[in-house]
Amino acid sequence: MKSLPPLLNASLLAGSLLAISLPAQASSHREAPNVTRLPTIDATDFYAFVSYEPGRGDYVTLIANYVPLQDAYGGPNYFAMDPDAVYAIHIDTDGDAVEDKTFQFRFSQSTDEFKLAIGEGMNQKEVAIPLKNYGNVDNDGATNFSETYEVTMVEGDSRSGMSTEVMSSMGGTTFTKPLDNIGEKSFSDYASYASTFVHDISVSGCAAGGKVFVGQRKDPFVVNLGKTFDLVNYVPLDGEGVQDDANDDLKDKNVTSIALELPVGCVTGSGNGVIGAWTTASLPQARILNPEATFAKPDVSGGALTQVSRLGMPLVNELVIGLAEKDTFNASEPKDDGQFADYVTHPTLPALLDILFRDALGAEDNIAPSNIPRNDLVTTFLTGFEGVNQQATVTASEMLRLNTSIAPTPAEDQSAFGVVAGDLAGFPNGRRPGDDVVDIALRVVMGALCYPVNIDLDGSGTAGDDGDNLGLCEPADAPVGDQPFTDQAPLDASYVDSTFPYLKAPLPGSVSE
């Protein structure tokens, strides 16, 4: 087990219940009624971690995934971003739950209107083709569609702060996005093709440059999706033979990723080195459909930008926020999260699991934790652990909190269970693509933090003994808190890459015979 930072000790980790609180948000594929109608701005997952690519430990990687449940064969138009939307990654450097720095992404689309000569002589006409490519893309450049984007850094309020354009190291402010992975006939080597769209960038005020990539990736999230939302149609306990890749309902899905790598000093500001981060997508208030729609103008949008998607910490909107307030959460800001307090202090998921599994687990009484209000959940998801990922100012709010001074764990040494397993560089200290947040969240919500954690807090020389209880609650409060709850779909760092942008190349729409 890696050694602890000097500032980490049991008293600092104890934490206290604050008056304002909210739960955690995980992968959010189709998590709210309104966003299901707007898939191009539906955030699916958000990651924030100190880069663990060798030699990049002085950088922070932020990844916001959008457009859920992409079938690789979903042509002919595939999965372009919304040119009317503003996609954003927000960073809070001082803990007041208000963004201090925001990176905004705006997309544009164009077509070359590639045409073929059809007919002969006087009957010949030049007619535009219906596809996004007309041959091999990576070797021949035979494309008929392209997406570009611009990145703006806003310091202060994301709507009214000072804006500067993020520059390419090659000059200019326009970046290109690769075509989606149409298939193995359209691309000879998609991974190599997509790697040419990793752009080196220069950011105002940053001592060193960074990187940006936007494009389709294999969805890194792993979850037993169908059975989980069918009232957890399995017994959610780990056992021999239970973990199986066949339980991952996203194993054949792609996603669109917005990935930034920035120097640590560029994102920490004047705080204590712990940052809060989240992603949002916003649309103009009004969209009027063009009754004579064209490629260039299918509609006209106007009015103030309105936030319609939000994602920070990983399973709030999916499994914690009440149905009637899911879209309210998506439209809200972290500073206003007090309105959702009851969902974390008095969570319903443990009660639902008790109804579903008390008999299956052989329990005679309620298996839901009894320590109400749930101080352990508030600390995990809303305030961070003092000495680990708590900011200088503590404002209970939902966002990923990352301590940039904790060195990254190399991919081969990472624990999918993060901090509770002794890997301080993992969830809930930020979130890496290989962190199994579903299993972690299931265990924490059922009271895992009422038991000793696998960290030598008391200096006894043994991690996980009785002296390593965080003091947030006691074993007696959580009858099954020591049980290995799981969705039975395994995940670890080997499921993703160990270099930027970390997520694997997307699955192809077709495979050559």
Image: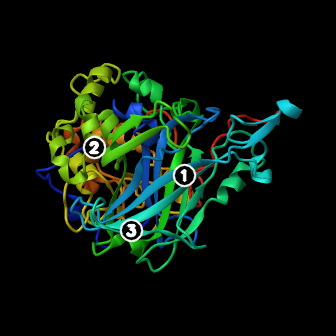
Question: Marks 2 and 1: in contact by CB < 8 Å?
Answer: no
- Identify the residue under disc 2: 331
Q: Earlier in the sequence, mark 2 or mark 3?
A: 2
Q: Classify residue 130 as left or right of residue 301.
A: right
Q: Which residue is mark 3?
A: 404
33, 97: nearer the viewer: 33
Q: Quadrant of the N terminus?
A: bottom left
x, y percentage for residue 217?
58, 47
Q: Name the quarter where the C terminus is drawn.
A: top right
Task: Report the residue marked by disc 1.
Answer: 493
* Residue 430 position in % (x across, y down): 38, 57
Mark toward the start of the polypeptide (1 vs 2): 2
Q: Residue furthest bottom?
A: 207
Q: CA distance from mark 2 to mark 3?
A: 28 Å
Q: Residue at x 53, y 59 (%)?
A: 413
443 with respect to 343 (left or right): right
- Viewer-side residue, 7 vs 323: 323
Q: Nearer the viewer, mark 1 or mark 2?
A: 2
Residue type at mark 3: give it: Thr
